[in-house]
Amino acid sequence: MKKIKIDKILKDGKAMFLAYDHGLEHGPTDFDDTDVDPSYIIDIAQKAGYNALIFQKGIAEKYNEQIKKSKIPLIVKLNGKTNLYKGEPVSRQICSVKEALELGAVAVGYTIYIGSRYESVMMKEFDEIQEEAHNKGLPVIVWIYPRGKSVENRAEGELMAYAARTALELGADIVKLKYNGNVKDLKWTVKSAEKTKVFIAGGSKEGEKDFIKEVKEMMKAGAAGIAVGRNVWQSDSPLELSRKIKKIIFD
Amino acid sequence: MKKIKIDKILKDGKAMFLAYDHGLEHGPTDFDDTDVDPSYIIDIAQKAGYNALIFQKGIAEKYNEQIKKSKIPLIVKLNGKTNLYKGEPVSRQICSVKEALELGAVAVGYTIYIGSRYESVMMKEFDEIQEEAHNKGLPVIVWIYPRGKSVENRAEGELMAYAARTALELGADIVKLKYNGNVKDLKWTVKSAEKTKVFIAGGSKEGEKDFIKEVKEMMKAGAAGIAVGRNVWQSDSPLELSRKIKKIIFD
Amino acid sequence: MKKIKIDKILKDGKAMFLAYDHGLEHGPTDFDDTDVDPSYIIDIAQKAGYNALIFQKGIAEKYNEQIKKSKIPLIVKLNGKTNLYKGEPVSRQICSVKEALELGAVAVGYTIYIGSRYESVMMKEFDEIQEEAHNKGLPVIVWIYPRGKSVENRAEGELMAYAARTALELGADIVKLKYNGNVKDLKWTVKSAEKTKVFIAGGSKEGEKDFIKEVKEMMKAGAAGIAVGRNVWQSDSPLELSRKIKKIIFD
Amino acid sequence: MKKIKIDKILKDGKAMFLAYDHGLEHGPTDFDDTDVDPSYIIDIAQKAGYNALIFQKGIAEKYNEQIKKSKIPLIVKLNGKTNLYKGEPVSRQICSVKEALELGAVAVGYTIYIGSRYESVMMKEFDEIQEEAHNKGLPVIVWIYPRGKSVENRAEGELMAYAARTALELGADIVKLKYNGNVKDLKWTVKSAEKTKVFIAGGSKEGEKDFIKEVKEMMKAGAAGIAVGRNVWQSDSPLELSRKIKKIIFD
Amino acid sequence: MKKIKIDKILKDGKAMFLAYDHGLEHGPTDFDDTDVDPSYIIDIAQKAGYNALIFQKGIAEKYNEQIKKSKIPLIVKLNGKTNLYKGEPVSRQICSVKEALELGAVAVGYTIYIGSRYESVMMKEFDEIQEEAHNKGLPVIVWIYPRGKSVENRAEGELMAYAARTALELGADIVKLKYNGNVKDLKWTVKSAEKTKVFIAGGSKEGEKDFIKEVKEMMKAGAAGIAVGRNVWQSDSPLELSRKIKKIIFD
């Protein structure tokens, strides 16, 4: 087994990632005239010293020079979908591991919707990615979101822990989850993930105070970091906010 | 990363393409005794100095000599479907990148119906095409049309911008869209596409005045060009109309 | 691009083919004690001087010696289905191009049901066959039949022309269609097919006079030939009838 | 084309096969303490001098030594399914041709449910098997059973003949069918199969007299043999019954 | 045929396995603060001298050093799913045979839900795994569980025997089943499995006395061993309980 070079995206086992795959997942309704531009995001990441940037391959390719110049490590998402289709969710591979490597990625990401009718299609695809990435020493991040008709009315805390454990069983190095707002549940989630590191998705924009409070909670509960997006790049003072997050995570 | 030779189909970053895949997409109801003949289209493209011709592989193959003689660059569409099936739309690959290259193509095109039940099937197929084409320096054009039950009642302007952004995230060099007639929406669409160039689909035949007015609007809104079809080759004076369009785009 | 050796199955750009894939497509209800035997068909083809025989791979293989001895060129159908299943029609590949070549085929055939839910599955499969066949100089014949729930209530003439045009766009050298009995529609169909040659399927057995009248109509409308089956081998005087057809086509 | 070594499983063009794939197709309800053991079956085959044994790969592998010692030629079934699922039937490949050869098979078998929604999936898979097997000189046996909602209320005799003809068109060397009990229908079925040999499936256990009478009928109608299972190994005197069958077939 | 090295996981043809794939199959609801940690499981296996540990690839990879140090043979499960999706069950491959070997596995496992709409998808995938594993001398364990709408109201005993026989026919070396609590049914099940060894799944936690009684019954009925999970690692005295089980199995 090859050594997984996870230290390229972690510092002391922790990290803060700047995520920006919203253009595909939600559409440009998430953006304004400023943050619609990937350059703006790369700029924030560089100035605030993020541990990595998360892009789809299109942006990773078209802004490659700027990303490289920024020296911020690149994570490429290998699947994705729009939010338009209303049936059971499925997100298939739209970038190969080989391509991600050529774009300079030091880690790859993939989303699995557990509970969906197509869960097994995504798990199988993820396995092939995980095997290829690990053979090249590349860490693998899995976004796991319980979705679809079958998970309606299921307890959120239980689902959060299930998502974390699924990531461990599938061989992910990092799992990115949505936090349900309950510290006790998150502690159990982190415990369930065992050697897989738990990262929390920033979620929609909220008041800065509330957001900072949540980040503190997450880190206390044992999360290894946060993958933040809208809360930072929709902020009026993204660098200042990033500085605060960084302090919570690393101090 | 190989350099993408997009300049073969652009002039000063702009272009006017003559599209003619209607025989497959709509059937010959779009044609009359004159424009049913691909030679007529090649002839218009050559005389009017279009930046490229867009054909399916069948026409690209059977009229190859004439296309080469015309010196008009060739774009080959790599998927397509009839308009007969009434369920969720899916259009699969019907020409390989290798084949397009052998036919002399300098760029390839592919249609994705976002919002369709089969969105992920097309996105995955597009990814493989994009990777292969870019590895050979070939620019990739994506037609993105929101379709299927899930997108009924969605705001057209929002969908147009979403289509443009999807193209960027997927790594297309050019996106071809349907214009909803609202300049403000188109500006935001062009902004959302960032480094991916926005081309507008000509649409059904309309009055020449209205059409010319629209082309002006599009270009002012930041589009890089137009992929025109019926409005030109169904016109009584296609060369004159082409000349007018050209003037709007390049002057 | 390799030269397509279409002259092996055409004479002066025209041809009459003897089709015999009915055993799979309709079952032996089409046969009697005489014409159930492929040898009988090969014998007719040889004596009447047909331009080619059309078989599924099973018959092409088991009667290979006799076919070769007859010197009648062989066309192998590469897909097929029974008429038993009542849902949306799909016919998948059941013979490879390589196998057809080894059986001595000088052309290959494939059926696409446009309008079916599975249209795109067949179009994609056809593309791969067409590419491989053309790379080996082998002409490709496509049977295109509009089918499935979506095409109910569509005008037959329009569908016939759409079928012909689809064949051109997909790169077929010959399209085999069902004639709707309207000369004007057929003329437009032939026009829509442009460089793809139009062949008419003989259809069910009818009175010889009516049949001969129809063949005359088809040829006058611009068809390149006919792929006849039941009308000939169910006839009491197949050689005489074949002679009449031949005269209409080539004189 | 390679010579198909069908003589390894036929004697004077005829044969009696001992079939034993019931454990997968019906479950052990077909067995008792004696015939549940594959050794018992191999023993019968050897003592009664069957022309071949028909097993799934699991039994062919685990009882390989005993099969080889018996000198009875081995036919391996390449697909199969349980009888539990109640929807449209599909049986996919569960043993490769390569594996069958390594197990010592001198012929391979495959089941197609014509009329099923998945008919085309099985036909395509069968084609690939047939091509590979024939390239290695291995005869191919196809079980064809009309099944699924679409064939309800269809005339049994017609379906039996259709099954036989389908086998010929697909390139099978032997077709195994269920006999509908009508001699005239079976004669037409044998005629429809032409160069593909018709074998009858023994079916459920019935009175020995009735069974023997049926075998006589089948052979008179032109069948090349019988693939018997339950009627023999559920019999109190399997060797004696086998001797009677043998006499009918070969004398 | 290569020799299958089944002795690596059996002792005198019998074994007790410690199974721990519950994190994926049921979620962490099966765990508490102690047994949520794979190290705890490995520790029990080592101290109690289990014949093998059963893990998904994620745990096999992340705890690889510890597993190797324990000297307990490793069995890697090659498919799996969450229990969230409520439709017809399907579990696809999420670890390759090659990967399992690199992780040090001496056997591989796979689950098939017979009776499910997707039965044939799993059987086909299992076949490919079985062939590859056997080519490398690796024993193959199949979990067979009758599931889905079609098996509702079917007799449990009959289904248990059917599961066992399916394993034999598919070429598994060991089948893992759920015991229905009826000794006579289990005897017939063991008989139906013939050369495939029958292992019983431990099932949910129950009173120790009941559990021990059941293990005795299973072994008397002819099972080759037990794959125990929750009953052991949820126990207050897992080593003592393991010792008791061991005594029953091997004495």
Image (cartoon, coloured by chain):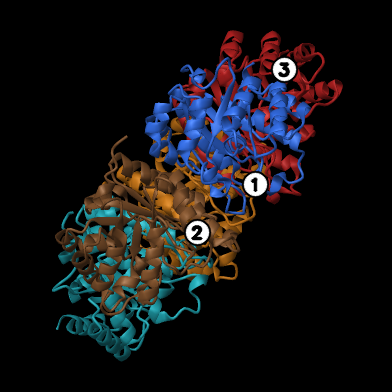
Chain colours: A orange, B red, C blue, D brown, E cyan
Report the label total: 3
- Three-letter code, disc 2: Lys
Task: Indicate the amino acid at tag 1.
Answer: Gly
First along the sequence among labels 3 and 1: 1
Disc 3 residue type?
A: Ile
**Disc 2 and disc 1: Cα gap in Å?**
56 Å
Q: Percent from the top left, x then y, of residue B227?
A: 69, 24
Q: Closer to the observer: label 2 or label 1?
A: 2
Mark 3, residue position: B249
* Residue B36 x %, y %: 72, 21
Which residue is at the front of the view, D25 or A101?
A: D25
The local secondary structure at tag 2 comes to helix
Number of the label disc, if any, that sits on residue D184:
2
Which of the numbered marks, if any, corresponds to residue C19? Answer: none
Q: Quadrant of residue C119?
A: top right
Q: Do labels 3 and 2 touch, CB within 8 Å?
A: no
Q: Mark 1, chain letter? A: B
